[in-house]
Amino acid sequence: ESATGGPSCPGSLIVVSNRQPYRHEYDDAGPPTETDGGARSSATAQTRSITVDEPTGGLTAGLDPVVKRTDGTWIAWGDGEADFDVTDDRNCVAVPPGEEDYTLRRLDLSEEAVDSYYYGFSNRVLWPLCHGFPDLIEDRSNDFEWYRTVNERFADAVADHATADAVIWLQDYHLALAPRMIRESVPAGTTVAHFWHIPWPSPPTFRQCPAGGRVLEGLLGNDLLGFHVEQYADRFLECVDRFLPTATVDHERRTVRYDGGRTRVVATPMGVDAAAYDRDARSVDPDRLADLLAEYDIAPDTTLGLGLDRLDYTKGIPERLAAIERFFERNPGWRGEFTFLQKATPSRTDIETYQRHGDLVRSEVQRINRRFETADWRPIAYTEDYLSTDDICTLYRRADAMVVSPLVDGMNLVAQEYVAASVDGDDTLVLSDRTGAHERLGSHALTIDPIDTDGFAAQLEAALSMPAHERRRRMNTLRQRVFTGDLESWMATQFDWFRRLRDERGRTDAG
Ligand code: F6P
């Protein structure tokens, strides 16, 4: 435990991710549209008044409290903020404004770099590949080269900050090549670790990865490589075995020896800051709830279903809408009594697949609403509005059933957030068995196969007709699991691993 409470990192922590935890705006532009939500607060910096977006949900919101405690450094893409810290060529800023807990170093990437690195190799190749949609891969010329260049820029920035006792902790699929580059430029003894937040594909799928060997080599620059679930860790080792003949894989110990280094591969499922969601949900403002429901034309006393996702083809939103349609076909008695609120956040809209997907979702909502709506009721309330963390917690607490139905999802933190915010203890979670979260929550959620429309609709019926004592029994166990495996315990596990690997290395060096 650190002096400020919470797990402590064995060394000075440098987090490296594509997304930055805080986005500063120096004018009054409208609310964010492309984060995982985005809480907005006004803060006064030393010289002028600025607005700060703190992404809600997802990776950045999850790690922010941890880096705050460790007094570390966070390196991320500056996300097009033309006005940030132009006087400082290292583009460092102390965050959060007013608290100045840690250093955020932002990389300014050109439009061309972002188009190829983020909208290209990251989200037109690795994202569909890892989620098992190889048909959606678009391998455009120059994208990999830009991905490599941007990874190099991240690695250079890390080298500026790394000391021998540093723990460098990379996040996610945008940075697969950086670990090897970092390894080659930082002092010996520095720990390089990586957490891969999305699934890892099977070897036949991975075979379709352009420059797949380079991706594997890059990741094997890490001392530690983490996944959410065992299956992804095992598949990674299988891919190394299959596609990197000079690597030696020990499947039992989950280690790889390659090019003089050793990478330990682990499965450590991420959790959420359960206490914070619990606290926020307990203090919801009833007037705000009434306003929100009124805004979306939802009757105050309706039975409420909720979906909350980025508008991404992996999230299974059309499949969910089909199940809702089937539910109303089979249960006319619920017409007028049950409303499903779908909040969708537009995402990666420069990519045509995402644009088409958004169009499909919107038109399906309209079609289903036209089919069943009455003078004073619509089955689906749909919004792409920005919602603050408080608003999200208000909806989590009010919703009688949360529906999380991805076609595949590395973890899905929304499912866990909902459970943490279900402080009344009598709500139900309908959960896809293709999410990482299902390993932890599947036994007490209502499990669905997202593409089995009939089975899905039947589970919606079951969720809405479940007796209160049964709902309470299930939610009680779900809450225990979410609180036991929360963000802090996940961090403690990571830090234990960093410590263990450092000790092992120390012993080897001494011997
Ligand atoms: O699920 C992977 C992930 O990187 C999350 O960590 C994050 O919430 C989400 O994707 C956001 O994607 P983007 O940064 O492209 O908006």
Image: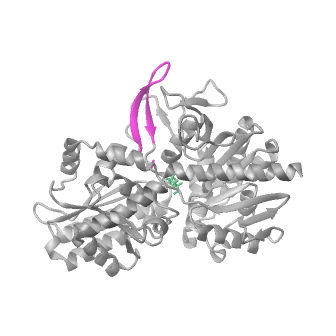
Q: Is residue 197 left or right of 291 when viewed as pictured?
A: right
Q: Where does the image place residue 391, in percent across and percent down from the top left?
A: 31, 46
Q: Where does the image place residue 351, in percent across and percent down from the top left?
A: 50, 58
- Is 41 one of the magenta-colored residues? yes
Residue 84 sits above or below residue 452 on the image: above
What segment is highlighted magenta in the picture? Answer: 35-54
Residue 446 sits above or below residue 76 on the image: below
Considering every residue shown, the one lying at the far left of the view is: 375
Looking at the picture, tell me which residue is in the foreground, 68 or 457: 68
- Is 460 one of the magenta-colored residues? no
Residue 16 sits above or below residue 439 on the image: above
Q: Is residue 121 left or right of 291 when viewed as pictured?
A: right
User: Which corner quadrant of the image does residue 8 belong to?
Assistant: top right
Instruction: Provide the major secondary structure of the magenta segment.
Output: strand
Q: Where does the image place residue 196, in percent across and percent down from the top left?
A: 61, 58
Q: At 75% from the left edge and 49% from the top edge, which residue is drawn?
A: 502
Looking at the picture, tell me which residue is in the foreground, 25 or 409: 409
- How many numbered discs sit on the rendered protein? 0
The colour mode here is one colour
Q: At 57% from the left edge and 34% from the top edge, which residue is drawn?
A: 3
| Residue 359 visible to the viewer | no
Looking at the picture, tell me which residue is in the foreground, 280 or 414: 280
Considering every residue shown, the one lying at the far top of the view is: 47
Quarter in which the N terminus is drawn: top right
Q: Is residue 22 left or right of 460 when viewed as pictured?
A: right
| Residue 161 visible to the viewer | yes
